[in-house]
Amino acid sequence: MKKLFLLITFLSLQQLFSQMSATEETYLGEIMFKKVNLLRKKKGIHPLKRSKDLAEAAKFQTDFMSSNNTVNHFQEEEKLYKTPLKRVRYFTTDFDNVGENILKTRRINPPFVKRKLNLIANLIFNSWRKSPDYYKNMISGSFTYADFGFTYNPTLKQIFAAHVFANKEYKVSNQLSEYAFGIKTDTTNCNSLSKEYDHIYTNLGNSISIENDEVLLKYDNIDDLSKLLTGENDGFAIDLVTREQLQCNIPNKLDASPIYDGILLKPIYKNELFTNNKAENGHNFVVSLGEIPAFLKGKEISPNLIIIKENTKCDYRVPTPIKDNRFQLMTIEPKFEEPYIDLQNQGIYIAKELFFEFETSKSTTDKYTQANFDLDNVHSFDIKSYTSIDGSEKANEIIQNKRAAFIKKHIGDVLGFSLDFKN
């Protein structure tokens, strides 16, 4: 029985050391998080915050990829977890606008000491950075939270990694109506809005102004409004968005509501709009669409117009008026320049590679690709030296430098190329 017990213990320990522990996964995530935020800092982008829910969604995906030996954003057979957004929503409803970076490494043997974990972090970080789509996620200003998941597959000896990004839904405080005064989002009621009315929508957006803390719609053609507002449940609502919600270098603080972005004023419908028309000064239609709430007075505000059909939000217009009297056009005489450009008729027309095969930790070799080109026409040499990911970072750096020096000497001694260059 003792022998059997010892054998079972040995196998358990062997299996244990072939895994990546939770502590090692946490350490790897911490290194990666620092690397990504350092990159964002260099780009002038706000740092990401960590989220336990996003970490769980990331780990959930890496476990799936490891079990199926796949690198895929989708879990086709699992409708509940099919997409990155659905996986995040499974763990929390606080986030939207989800992004995901994934990969699996080449074969890596345990144990996962800290030196090796640092090298693995560099490997994953650089792989994602070289991918245009993944790099875009890493430096995106639209994400505020992110976290990592890692799963080591002991059979494949590969690490599956996921980096999940998201933006936490923002809720504007002091909202006047929690349910947007009953305005719906079902766009089937908007099908009657023809493209021929698009110019009316644009003009309406540019016809909104704030005067004495009152939002006014001043429109010159009442017939256009009669064509647009045909039913009793057709009307307008004002969404007040402050400048504070749209600051530079930080995510926009627009409300998560599908109806409004800022503070929604009570909608006004067809009958009330035409009844309260107080046109004057040459306008055919002038009506108040609401007053600025006390807590917004004195702030820089954009009054945006929501067009309602059958009690449904059908269009959203932002005012962009341009006052002609602000600008003075000047007559400028054109000048033609004929710069002299010295065109080159020669350039780099071919590039070839020489490969040197090094064994284990050796820094010299007699195995290399023969130079089968005219050295008299060589412009330059680009030396790249590599080592495996195993071993300490310092030892690997020493071997890399020795190998690079050997290649440089070979170029001078064997190929006869001048050594007066930088490698």
Image: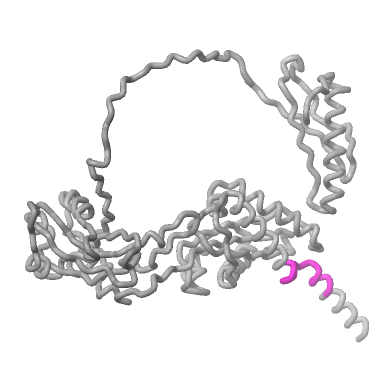
Which image quarter holds the C terminus? top right
Q: Residue furthest bottom?
A: 1
Left or right, 384 with reference to 50: right
Q: Quadrant of residue 397?
A: top right
Q: Quadrant of residue 285?
A: bottom left
Which image quarter holds the N terminus? bottom right
**Image point (15%, 49%), residue name:** 196
Q: Residue furthest right?
A: 2
Residue 40 image position (x, y, % from top left): 59, 53
- Whether residue 378 appears in magenta in the rendering, the answer is no
Q: Return the residue nearer the eye: 194 or 286.
A: 286
Q: Return the residue nearer the eye: 63 or 234.
A: 234
- As drawn, 73 above or below 341: below
**Image point (66%, 55%), residue name:** 35
Q: How many numbered marks have been drawn onto this rendered protein structure?
A: 0
Residue 31 image position (x, y, % from top left): 70, 60
- As drawn, 378 above or below 197: above
**Image point (72%, 16%), residue name:** 377
- Whether residue 17 appears in magenta in the rendering, the answer is yes
Q: Which residues are magenta?
A: 13-24
Q: Return the residue nearer the eye: 21 or 267.
A: 267
Q: How is the image coloured?
A: one colour
Left or right, 79 with reference to 121: left
- As drawn, 391 above or below 153: above
**Image point (19%, 66%), residue name:** 289
